[in-house]
Amino acid sequence: MSSLPTYETLKLSQPKPYVTLVELNRMTKLNAMNQQLFDDLKACFEQLNIEKRCRVIVLTGSGRAFSTGIDIKYLSNVAAESAEIDDIARKALHVRSMIQRTQESIRAVDKCEKPVIAAIHGYCIGLVLNNEYICLHLEEVDIGLAADVGTLQILPKLINDHSLFRELVLTSRTYDTNEEQQIGLIR
């Protein structure tokens, strides 16, 4: 890769040949995910997927957290935009298009054919976890939102137990790594 692409909310580097480090770079917001970060993630992973000099991707967060999940300010802006729309059907279409745009970013990471290693540290809210020092917690439930950026689609495939799945998404209970391993989230 002669020169790495630049993004507003991501920092890319190549610490070793064929290894690309992608850092979420909104340190002042603990890497909370806004629309720009979602758009950058999608563009970045689509580009790295076809880049011949990239064979593995390490995804991490700059600063003291991997990510605190979706940016509440971004969510409130989406809600404010929706509130300005009078027709309920158009309002629903607007919200749906924002959700789909966000989901496309997460799917771009998932669809990437290169191995992606998540180097998680500190907070990691709203993303699937696999680390002995990190706990699973669905924060969306605590603030009255549906975890619809991919969590509700991915979790049932990982744990294969509908009763446990419902407990996870309805109670917002925090699971430590021992429990995560027992239910199949950590392998």
Image: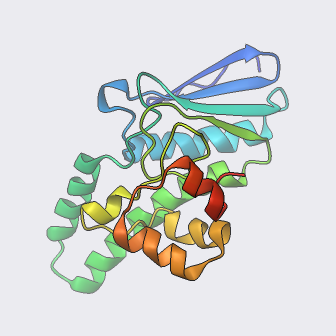
Rendering coords of residue 89 (x, y %) = 29, 85
Q: Is residue 185 visible?
A: no
> Quarter-wise, where is residue 13 in the image?
top right
Q: How is the image coloured?
A: rainbow
Q: Is residue 40 left or right of residue 54?
A: left
* 105 to 157, vertically: above or below: above
Image height of 169 relative to 9, above or below: below
Q: Nearer the viewer, residue 92 or 20?
A: 20
What residue sits 47% from the left and 24% below the top? 62
Position of the N terminus, as image quadrant, is top right
Q: Position of residue 58 (x, y in %)?
A: 67, 31
Residue 125 visible at all: yes
Horizontally, residue 51 falls left or right of residue 37, namely right
**Residue depicted at x 26% and y 76%:** 91
Whole-percent x, y for residue 70 in the image: 36, 49
- The percent position of residue 17, horizontal first and vertical second, equals 82, 17
Residue drawn at (23%, 84%), measured in percent from left and top? Answer: 88
